[in-house]
Image (cartoon, helix red, strand yellow):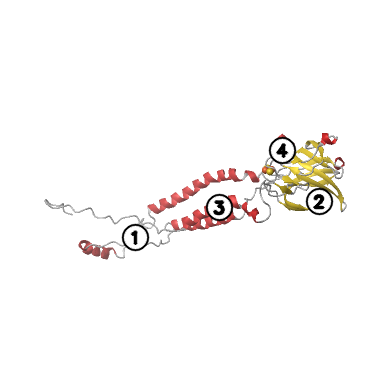
């Protein structure tokens, strides 16, 4: 082009026509993000059902996203909007001639796999790899521990001859002597006698069904009754059995009240007190794991216990409210 002469104004720079040829916008990243959100929400709401659904959504959309992003690298045509440029009159002749010359000419070497595509794929791949390396150990440390090392603790409370029929005892014991006093628990135990040729015991946990405070027996205990506390040395260490005559059980924290079957009678607790499963082994009373109870119909050996998997304090175990609580990791 000739330089502008004196008195002539330089024309403004012409717009460049070599913008990068960007891929068409796609919804796959949005679907991938939605899948990740569903996974995270599912970890709180329902890790067994919602999270896998979110994971499936993320995997499907992530695959589609990666496939679209690497389509050109893999030799597939990418459908994009046609490039159109206004053809100015002064250039029309030159461009037409150029197009005529180049028509049918093979693409220049390297155009099929442009460097920008390679860098884009490499960035996505490396980013995903680094993200996985960073995220997976953190997620593992955060999520896995509650699911590991869970084991049922059995507690030997001593011979069943220590429990006269119809009498209540406050039993204190260690669920795991290796852990020491932090594993000390309390249960209210009553021998209901024999029913259908099988010994029956009512064994109620003292963990309040509101927020977990230690529930107390509403009634006189050992010294007032003139009865001695029984001490047993078992493989779980020292077990103490203190006689009590409860009219019910009460919580000192917020006034929750329960009857002698553990049913809630007043206050904020949302269900009955938890109970211990048990078995009689070689004439000894063995406590197994605990389970939760919505309510109990009847009393003693003839009670019908509405039993559920162990839930946390304050959680409904029945009715529509039960769906408002996240699933608990397994625990005994
Ligand atoms: S913790 Fe027992 S009533 Fe609140």
**Disc nearest the viewer among 4 and 3:** 4
In terms of depth relative to the viewer, which is nearer, 222 or 220?
Answer: 220
Question: Along the horizontal axis of the image, is 42 left or right of 113?
Answer: right
Q: Quadrant of residue 219?
A: top right
Taking 173 as reference, is 23 above or below it?
below
| Percent position of residue 215, x then y | 73, 41
Task: State which tag comes first along the sequence, 4 or 1.
Answer: 1
Residue 170 shows up from this direction = yes
Determine whether the residue tagged by mark 4 lies in a helix, strand or loop. Answer: helix
Judge the density around disc 3: few (<14), some (14-19), many (≥20) Cα neighbours within 10 Å. many
Q: Which mark is residue 183?
A: 4
Q: Residue at x 40, y 54 (%)?
A: 117
For label 1, the residue is 107
For label 3, the residue is 39
| Percent position of residue 144, x then y | 62, 45
Judge the density around disc 4: few (<14), some (14-19), many (≥20) Cα neighbours within 10 Å. few
Task: State which tag comes first along the sequence, 4 or 3.
Answer: 3
**Disc nearest the viewer among 3 and 2:** 2
Residue sitting farthest toward the left = 6
Q: Residue at x 75, y 43 (%)?
A: 249
| Percent position of residue 182, x then y | 70, 36
Taking 212 as reference, is 116 above or below it?
below
Q: Residue at x 71, y 47 (%)?
A: 266
Determine whether the residue tagged by mark 1 lies in a helix, strand or loop. Answer: loop
Q: Quadrant of ligand 1?
A: top right
Quarter of the C terminus within the rendering: top right
Real-space CA distance between mark 1 and mark 2, rounded to the nearest whole angstrom = 89 Å
For label 2, the residue is 299
């Amino acid at each position: 082009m000739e330089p502008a002469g004196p008195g002539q104004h330089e024309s403004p720079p012409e717009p460049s026509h070599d913008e990068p040829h960007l891929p068409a916008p796609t919804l796959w990243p949005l679907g991938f993000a939605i899948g990740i959100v569903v996974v995270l929400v599912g970890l709180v709401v329902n890790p067994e059902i919602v999270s896998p659904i979110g994971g499936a959504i993320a995997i499907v959309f992530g695959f589609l996203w990666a496939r679209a992003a690497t389509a050109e690298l893999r030799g597939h045509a990418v459908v994009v909007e046609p490039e159109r440029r206004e053809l100015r009159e002064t250039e029309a002749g030159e461009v037409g001639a150029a197009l005529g010359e180049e028509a049918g000419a093979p693409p220049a070497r390297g155009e099929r796999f442009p460097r920008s595509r390679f860098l884009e794929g490499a960035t996505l791949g490396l980013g995903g790899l680094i993200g996985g390396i960073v995220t997976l150990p953190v997620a593992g440390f955060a999520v896995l521990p509650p699911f590991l090392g869970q084991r049922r603790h059995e507690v030997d409370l001593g011979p069943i001859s220590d429990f006269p029929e119809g009498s209540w005892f406050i039993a204190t014991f260690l669920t795991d002597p290796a852990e020491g006093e932090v594993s000390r628990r309390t249960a209210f135990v009553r021998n209901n006698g024999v029913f259908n040729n099988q010994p029956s015991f009512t064994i109620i946990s003292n963990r309040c069904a509101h927020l977990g405070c230690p529930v107390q027996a509403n009634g006189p205990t050992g010294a007032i009754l003139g009865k001695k506390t029984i001490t047993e040395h078992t493989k779980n260490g020292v077990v103490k059995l203190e006689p009590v005559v409860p009219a019910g059980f009460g919580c000192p924290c917020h006034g929750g009240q329960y009857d002698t079957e553990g049913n809630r009678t007043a206050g904020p607790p949302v269900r009955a007190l938890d109970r211990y499963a048990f078995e009689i082994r070689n004439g000894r009373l063995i406590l197994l794991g605990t389970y939760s109870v919505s309510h109990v119909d009847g009393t003693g050996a003839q009670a019908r216990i509405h039993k559920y998997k162990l839930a946390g304090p304050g959680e409904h175990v029945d009715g529509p409210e039960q769906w408002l609580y996240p699933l608990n990791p397994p625990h005994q």
